[in-house]
Amino acid sequence: MVSEPKRRSTPAGTPVTTFRLRVPPSPSDPAVVGCSIPVVLLGASDPSIVEGSEVEVEGALTERRWEARGGTRKNHFEILARMARVL
C-alpha cells in the first residue's frame, strides 16, 4: 500500500512521482517485520496510483550515503522505480 503520491517535474521537464511503499509484517514469516520505503518513479506514472493502492514496483534498491554536520554519517534507502502499477 502506498502513501499519498507527490507528482512534480524536474527542471528538464521529466515527470517524477514519489510515495512511500508500506510493507506490512508477514503473519506466515516472522522474519518479515514490515517497513516503509520511499519510491521514486521517473517518467510517466499511472494516475490511478492513489493513497492506499496496492502496487507492484519494479526497480533498483539504492542507498545514498553522506556526512552530516558534525561528522555524523547518514544513509537513506529508496527504490528507483522503472515501473509502478496498481494491482
Image (cartoon, grey):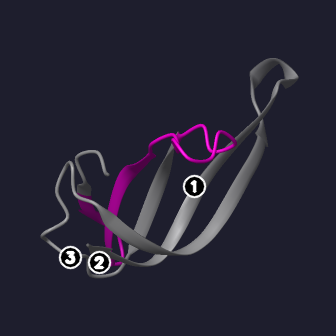
Q: First in sequence, mark 1 or 2: give its number.
A: 2
Quadrant of residue 31 within the rendered picture: top right
Q: CA distance from mark 3 to mark 1?
A: 19 Å
Instruction: Find the distance from the CA under tag 1 to the CA under tag 2.
Output: 22 Å
Quick one: SS at disc 1? strand
Judge whether 25 appears above or below 60 on screen: above
Query: What residue appears at the point 64 percent right and 50 percent down from the top-left corner?
Result: 77
Task: Please tell me how crowded label 1 is: few (under 14), some (14-19), or many (20+) other residues with Cα within 10 Å.
Answer: some
SS for tag 2? Answer: loop
Give the magenta range: 7-34
Q: Is residue 5 above or below residue 67?
A: below
Q: Is residue 10 visible?
A: no
Q: Say which amino acid is labelled 1.
A: Glu
How dense is the environment of label 2, judged by Cα within 10 Å: few (below 14), some, or many (20 and up)? few
| Residue of label 3 | 46
Residue in the picture at 33% in, 78% down: 14
Of pointers 2 and 3, the one earlier in the residue sequence: 2
The residue tagged 2 is 13
Q: Which residue is mark 1?
A: 78
The amino acid type of the residue labelled 3 equals Asp
**Where does residue 35 sit, x and y in percent of width and height?**
54, 40
Residue found at the far right of this picture: 71
* Residue displayed at 25% across by 76% down: 45
Helix, strand or loop at label 3? It is loop
Q: Which residue is situated farthest in the top direction here?
A: 70
Q: Which amino acid lies under the numbered mark 2 shown in the image of this protein?
A: Gly
